[in-house]
Amino acid sequence: MHSVEIKDLDLNFGSVKVLQGLNLDIHDGEFLVLLGASGCGKSTLLNCIAGLLEVSDGQIFIKDDNVTWKEPSERGIGMVFQSYALYPQMTVEGNLSFGLKNAGTPRDEIAKRVARAAEILQIEPLLKRKPGALSGGQRQRVAIGRALVRDVDVFLFDEPLSNLDAKLRADLRVEIKRLHQQLQNTIIYVTHDQVEAMTLADRIAIMKGGAIQQLASPEEIYNRPGNKYVADFIGSPSMNFLEGVLDGDAFRVGDQTFSTVGYNFKSTASGQASMGVRPEHVVIGDAARAMPNTVDTTVDIVEPMGSDTLVWAPVAGNRFRIRIDGQTAISTGDQITIGFDAARASFFDAGTELRL
C-alpha cells in the first residue's frame, strides 16, 4: 500500500522551473530519504507534500486521499523543521500540547499524548523546563515530540539535525531510527548528509536539478549507482574516476590497460567510458598482487583519520584515493602496489553518464 503518491508534479517560481514531471511512490511505513546538494529541490518537494507551497501542476495523494489543494492542517502530517521553532515562553509540556489545545482536543487526550511522546523521546524530566534551559539535542527532541503528539500517519523531517554538532547528530540519528522502528509510521526525511541517508533510509531518492536521479535502497545506490552523479555523490571519500575506452574485456586509459572481467555489464558496451572505483575497494601490498588489476605507484599524500588512513597516489595520470587501515605504516614518497577487482567497480557511458 502506498502512503504517499506524487504524480507528474510541477512547481514553478515565475519562469523558473524547480520541479518538473516528478513522480514518487512512498510505501506505507517506509523511511524515505530525499538526498541531494543544496538547491536540488528536496526541501521544495517536502514543502509541496506538506502543503506549504502551492504546486503548478500534478497531484499529491496521502493515504489515497487527494490532498493537492488541501491546507497543511488537513493533510494528516506532522512536520519537524531544521529550526526548532519552539515557543520560548512556554514549558516543554506547553509546546507539546499547544497545537492540540488549539485543535480543541479533550484535556485527558492531550495529557495522554504528551505523556506518550515524552516517554518515547525520553524527555519526561524536561516537561517543566523552558526551551532556554535545554541543549540543542533536547530542543530537537521536543520539536519531534510536537509532531509526534499529532498522532498522524506521515512525518516530514526537513534537515532536523543540521544545526547540531557532530556527536549530537550521531546520537539523535540513532534515536530517530529507533523511533521509526517503534512507531512504524511513514517518514519522509530531507538531508544533504549522505551518512544520515545511508544509515536511516529504507530507500533513498537522490535529487539533482529538481529531478530524481535514482530511487533505491542504500545498498543498491552504494554498490550499483545508476549514473556518474550518484556514484560521485555517495561515498566519503568519493569514488575515483578514470576516463578511457572500453574494448572487449579491457578498459584502456592511455598506456594503462585494466581488465573488466567479472563486471556485470547491462549490455555489450564499447567506446568512451568512465570507470569508477571506491577508495575502500582498493588494496595495497601483498593483497594487491592477488587482484586482477594492479598498478605500481608512489604515495603523494597521506591523511591519517584514526581508524582509517586516506592515501593519495597517481594512477594513469589521475589522482587516486585509497582507503586503508589506520594502523598501516605508510609515508609520502613510499613505492606501493595497489590493486582492485573490476567486479566491484562501476562503468558509465562517457556521453549519457548512465551506468553500463
Image (cartoon, rainbow, N blue to C red):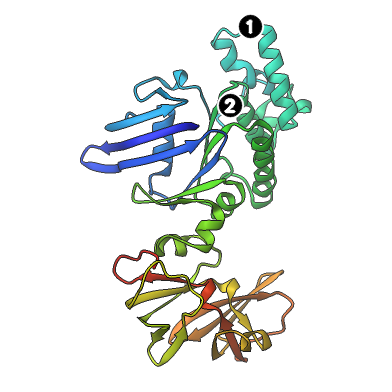
Q: Disc 2 on helix, strand or loop?
A: helix
The label number, if any, that marks residue 106 in the structure image:
1
Along the viewing direction, whichever of 66 and 49 lies nearer the viewer: 66
Tell how many labels.
Answer: 2
* Side of 339 where 315 appears, left or right: left
Location of residue 170 with respect to 310 vertically, above or below: above
Q: Nearer the viewer, residue 250 or 125?
A: 250
Q: Residue shown at 55%/67% (left/top)?
A: 237
Q: Position of residue 258 (x, y in %)?
A: 46, 85
Q: Which mark is residue 145?
A: none
Upstream in sequence: badge 2 or badge 1 = 1
Residue 200 visible in the snapshot? yes
Name the quarter where the C terminus is drawn: bottom left
Q: Amino acid at mark 1?
A: Pro
Query: What residue is shown at x 70% (from left), y 13% (from top)?
Result: 111
Q: Position of residue 171 (x, y in %)?
A: 70, 46
Q: Is residue 351 left or right of residue 260?
A: left
Q: Is disc 2 surrounded by few (<14), some (14 to 19) or many (20+) residues within 10 Å?
A: many
- The answer to whether the residues at label 2 and label 1 have Cβ atoms under 8 Å apart is no
